[in-house]
Image (tube, rainbow, N blue to C red):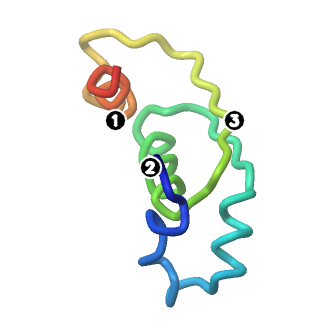
């Protein structure tokens, strides 16, 4: 089972325990997962942001998959 405190324990020192809990309960909206949006999403998830609202109107095609980090993650995870 996933343990949030253990997963993000290395953040303590960069942020306080209270700040980490704020991140856990923060919601972030991401507009687009290509290029910059995908990178920002990964960084925010690694910081411990707990909730995302993600919108990407583009379609995933073989010729643009290299810009979609999340495309590869979804395929691998499923």
Q: Position of residue 42 (x, y in %)?
A: 44, 49
Q: Which badge, 2 or 1, comes first in the chain's sequence?
A: 2
Q: What is the CA distance from the residue labelled 3 to the residue labelled 2? A: 13 Å
Who is closer to the viewer here, 72 or 35? 72
- Residue at the location (69% across, 35% down)? 53
Contact between labelled residues 1 and 2, with CB atoms less than 8 Å apart = yes
Who is closer to the viewer here, 66 or 44? 44
Q: Position of residue 2 (x, y in %)?
A: 48, 50
Q: Which badge, 1 or 3, comes first in the chain's sequence?
A: 3
Give the labeled residue for mark 1: 69
- Residue at the location (51% across, 53% down)? 45
Contact between labelled residues 2 and 3, with CB atoms less than 8 Å apart = no
- Residue at the location (51% across, 42% down)? 37
Give the labeled residue for mark 3: 53
**Quadrant position of residue 48:** bottom right
Who is closer to the viewer here, 7 or 35? 7
Is residue 63 left or right of 3 when viewed as pictured? left
Is residue 16 left or right of 73 when viewed as pictured? right
Q: Is residue 6 above or below residue 60?
A: below
Q: What is the CA distance from the residue labelled 1 to the residue labelled 3? A: 17 Å
> For the C terminus, which image quadrant?
top left
**Quadrant position of residue 72:** top left
Under tag 2, what secondary structure?
Answer: helix
**Quadrant position of residue 7:** bottom left
Is residue 37 left or right of 68 when viewed as pictured? right
Is residue 66 left or right of 20 when viewed as pictured? left
Give the labeled residue for mark 2: 42
- Residue at the location (70% across, 42% down)? 29
């Amino acid at each position: 089972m996933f343990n949030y405190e253990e997963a993000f324990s290395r953040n303590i020192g960069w942020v306080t325990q209270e700040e980490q809990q704020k991140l856990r309960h923060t919601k972030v909206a991401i507009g687009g997962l290509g290029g910059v949006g995908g990178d920002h999403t990964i960084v925010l998830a690694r910081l411990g942001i707990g909730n995302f609202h993600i919108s990407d109107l583009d379609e995933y095609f073989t010729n643009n998959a290299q810009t979609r980090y999340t495309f590869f993650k979804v395929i691998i995870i499923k």
